Image (cartoon, grey):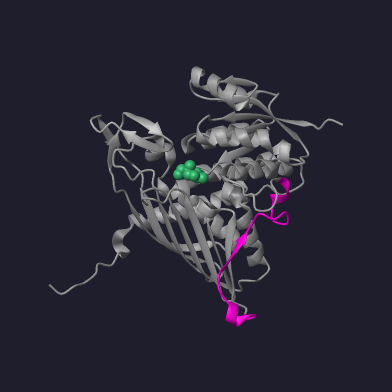
Amino acid sequence: MTKDSLRVAMIGTAFMGKAHSQAWRTAPHFFDLPLEPRLELLVGRSPEGTADRAGRLGWEQWSTDWRAAVANPDIDVIDICTPGDTHAEIAIAALEAGKHVLCEKPLANSVAEAERMTEAAERAHASTGAIAMCGFSYRRTPALILARRFVEEGRLGAIRHVRAAYLQDWLRDANAPLTWRLDRTKAGSGALGDIGAHSIDTAQWLTGQSITEVSATMRTFVTERPERAETVGLGGRGDEHAPKGPVTVDDAAAFTASFSEGALGVFEATRMATGRRNANRIELNGERGSVAFDFERMNELEYFDGSGADPDAEGFRRIQVTDPAHPYMSNWWPTGHGIGYEHLFTHQAVEFIRAIAGEAPASPSFAEALDVQRVLASVEASASDRSRATPVERPR
Ligand code: SOE
């Protein structure tokens, strides 16, 4: 029997466009899915670039008109992989047209936009059954899912500390180019929304607790950058003699946070941590145990069992999260053969398809992503209110 197909149109052709394309293509090869995704239509800005990407990434057709994609009755899913300033308009139009929507993180550039998107998602779900999900892809990391299970099983006891640092360094060169990620009107914020949003989402999801209060500082170390540049990966090296334009977002954000059940959080997000390429780290310390994760060793989870069962042998142990019993792993390679960054997007596509088929809840929902947006807004508000920054008094 052939499966019903799920016809996908993806808007955006850059980094996330590549990651999502691979996910849509790979998911049915490795997972038994209720619906068969079809890479129907790729939408980009330039005709040449989009045609080339569509060919390479395996899309049937391409176009430069997202509105036509949204109106197309032969499309079931709109996958949004564009900068944040376009998310609300595309997502709301797609939901109103009865499409399922997968939207990259952060959900929007403001709380107001995220609220409108969430209302549209709830309305569309009630009227057409449309599913909306936000792409906090690190939730699909097997080691983090295991950590969450440990928290739910009570192995950590009451959680006291949440320590999250998302460290990258692709902006460390002062001549790295002025890309859209450094433009507040396009990206909403800098390191905070781009990667700090992942830490906020992961922390709330892992602990099952909400952040209730924050106290923040943000910094832009390099305030202008060359506009003319050869980009390499996310950064690259700009032409230092080229005209410069203003950086309008943060390079780094740091904040403390209180959680609803009493945990104390310390967060750091930076794209200036020289030598740290994609160190998305989180550690939880509970009264009975701890877990620690670093994306640069994504197939491992550190676990400390402080229950006192074997006091002489206490210590953090490194669980290699590659066994068939671990989340998603039986669909991939034999034990010990780890997975990588791209696999998380495949897991995300799998969960989205299952949610559309009614087999699983759509999580992170737009409502959950709106909650992250509210925390981001509070961090920015706190950082801009310097009245509570207390100078250090020193004798002259
Ligand atoms: C850039 O900092 C980035 O690509 C983020 O936008 C992604 O969400 C993260 O997974 C990797 O880094």
Image quadrant in which the C terminus is located: bottom left
List x then y, in percent, for residue 232: 40, 34
The foreground one among 378 and 189 is 189
Image quadrant in which you'd find residue 145: bottom right
List x then y, in percent, for residue 277: 43, 48
**Does residue 300 sit above or below 396 in this rendering?**
above
The foreground one among 194 and 280 is 280
Image quadrant in which the N terminus is located: top right
Q: Residue at x 37, y 52 (%)?
A: 273
**Does residue 306 sit above or below 357 in this rendering?**
below
Image quadrant in which you'd find residue 292: bottom right
Count of marks, rendered view: 0
Q: Is residue 222 left or right of residue 150?
A: left
Q: Residue furthest left?
A: 396
Q: Is residue 159 left or right of residue 270?
A: right
Q: Can residue 113 be seen in this snapshot?
A: yes
Q: Which residues are magenta?
A: 308-331
Q: Is residue 309 magenta?
A: yes
List x then y, in percent, for residue 11: 56, 30
Q: Is residue 154 left or right of residue 201?
A: right
